[in-house]
Amino acid sequence: MIRSSLLATAVALLLSVPAAAATVFSTDFSTDTPGLNVVPAGFSVTGLVDIVGPVNGFGIVTPGGNVVDLDGTPGPGEITSLASYFFQPGDRVSLSFLLGGAQRGSASDNVFARLIFGQVTDALDLTVYGTLGNTVYSGVQSFAATFTAGGSIAGSDPFALTGFTFTAVNAGALAFSIGTTSDDFIGPLVADVTLDIAPIPLPAAGGALVLGLGLLAALRRKRA
């Protein structure tokens, strides 16, 4: 059964055609009304977060639209996507967002982001970039539930493109979250969140590679 399923996957990969990145989720928080203790559209909130507009009384300079202050009034807070998004073997998954310092004289805050998987997921060449660090995990990484990356961001740090990319080895689904444990009412700022999931064109060698990786991962889980 495993072999037939993997064979079907390999055929699908080898017959795949080039495709542009498909945006499955995107928000600039423009539909959210600025205020304290707001739940952004498309997210649930753990703790409390605030929405800050480009015109505000806090001295915050936004990258153009609304932003989420992850350390709400009071914080801290974490925003988690309400939906999970499906991917197939060979899909390139990319979560990106703008992450900036708290401004307002804050020295530094911690910040983290999570990929939340619905099942055991094998990810090829997972890359973390931006404020969360710049790390490439070569080869296949297996995740049973979540992958979290975190770091520290100075209050004066400008908005920087931050996020994750990986190529899926097996089918699955993911949600995501962004948060802080800062609890001084002045937290990191998030804007322009986008999740892209799309097939990538694979030559025969690439298709065979993904097939082989998928077979190894499936056999490893079967033995376990």
Image (cartoon, rainbow, N blue to C red):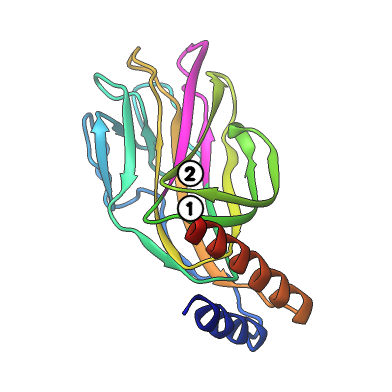
Residue 93, quarter of picture: bottom right
Residue under the point 56% across and 63% down: 219
First to last magenta residue range? 97-116
| Disc nearest the viewer among 2 and 1 | 1
Measured as percent of width and height from the top left, residue 154 is found at 56, 18
Q: Secondary structure at mark 1?
A: loop
Number of numbered discs on residues = 2
Dominant SS in magenta = strand
Find residue 106 and report its horizontal and vertical position in percent: 48, 12
Q: Is residue 136 magenta?
A: no
Q: Which secondary structure lies at badge 2? A: loop
| Residue drawn at (34%, 58%) of the image | 84
Q: Position of residue 1 (x, y in %)?
A: 46, 80
Q: Is residue 78 left or right of residue 17?
A: left
Q: Amino acid at mark 2?
A: Gly
Q: Residue at x 39, y 56 (%)?
A: 119
Q: Furthest residue to the front? A: 223
Q: Which mark is residue 64?
A: 2
Q: Is residue 132 left or right of residue 54?
A: right
- Residue pictured at 34% horizontal, 50% vertical: 30
Circle 1 residue: 224
* Tag 2 and tag 1, C-beta contact below 8 Å: no
Q: Is residue 99 above or below residue 164?
A: above
